[in-house]
Image: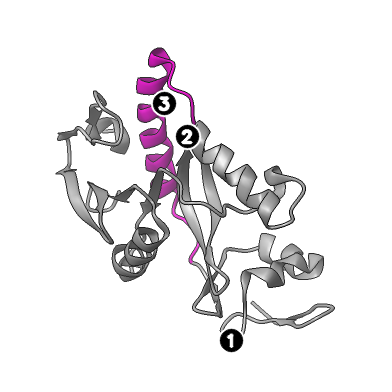
Amino acid sequence: MGSIITTSKRFEPGTTGWTADDLDDPHIEAQWERGRYEIIEGVLTTMPAAYFEGGEATENLIFAVKTHLRPKGIRGGFATEVDLIIDAARLVRADAVYLTPDDKRRQRAAAAAAGRPDSRRTRILVAPTLVIESISPGHELHDEQTKRRWYAEFGVAHYWLMNCFDRTLRCLARRGTDYIEDVAGPDSDSVRPSAFPGLVIPLGDVWEE
């Protein structure tokens, strides 16, 4: 993707010196929204395009959780392709996040503290209860090591790593400054993550066997 001249700086993946505050420039934000980008330790980075299978499995996984929560009257919401501001030099795009009502309250408070009048138009500033990443081939280390470390530092309570290509789901739970494996399963196994007591996820439904 070529360089784009904005009012303040050149929008060029691979360049350094980027922070989340740069997206306050509407010209930069417009370019950001046209692609898939992250800011990794101050470097503007292009993310690979998502595969259909990964997106479909993510939606199926979300559906399984929502189907469990709705009859219980448990409120909360999922969104996909969400920007999380870990800190000024680290802005990542999560495949899916789940926010509880308390998470949403904290987000509104954080947005107000940051001087942003509309929390609905503010990237996520607080740790979600759950982040889901769908691992793409060749991008495993970013999700399994870098994002794992950053999400733990940020305070994300539950981190699920889904790989539709080897048909596995690993559900991690935060303990201290890192994660432990809560539950994991391959193929047609059923998993019971502690993030949602009573939830049983038949993985065959996730991969749509």
The residue shown at (68%, 58%) is 114
- Residue at image point 77% right, 48% down: 117
Farthest residue to the top: give it. Answer: 71
Q: Is residue 70 magenta?
A: yes
Looking at the rendered image, the quarter that the N terminus falls into is bottom right
Q: In what element is the residue under mark 1? A: loop
Sequence-first tag of 2 and 1 = 1
Structural distance between the alpha carbons of marks 2 and 1: 35 Å
Q: Secondary structure at mark 2?
A: loop
Q: Position of residue 167 (x, y in %)?
A: 23, 47
For the residue pair 175 and 160, the one nearer the viewer reads as 175
- Chain-order first, disc 2 or disc 3: 3
Report the disc number at residue 66.
3
Q: Is residue 109 left or right of residue 25?
A: left
Specify whether residue 81 is painted magenta.
no
Q: Nearer the viewer, mark 2 or mark 1?
A: 2
Of the two numbered discs 2 and 3 in the rendering, the one whose residue sits closer to the viewer: 2
Whether label 2 touches label 3, CB < 8 Å = no
Q: Real-space Cα distance between discs 3 and 1?
A: 40 Å
Q: Position of residue 129 (x, y in %)?
A: 41, 43
Q: Callout 2: few (<14), some (14-19), or many (20+) C-alpha neighbours within 10 Å? A: some
N-terminal of the pair, mark 3 or mark 1, is 1
Q: Which residue is at the front of the view, 98 or 169? A: 98
Mark 2 vs 1: CB contact within 8 A: no
- Reading the image, the residue beneath label 1 is 16
Tally the numbered discs.
3
Say above or below: 43 vs 37: below
Q: Position of residue 9 (x, y in %)?
A: 76, 83
Res. 155 visible in picture = yes
Distance CA(mark 2)–CA(mark 3): 12 Å
On residue 100, which mark appears? 2
Query: What's the magenta region?
Result: 48-76
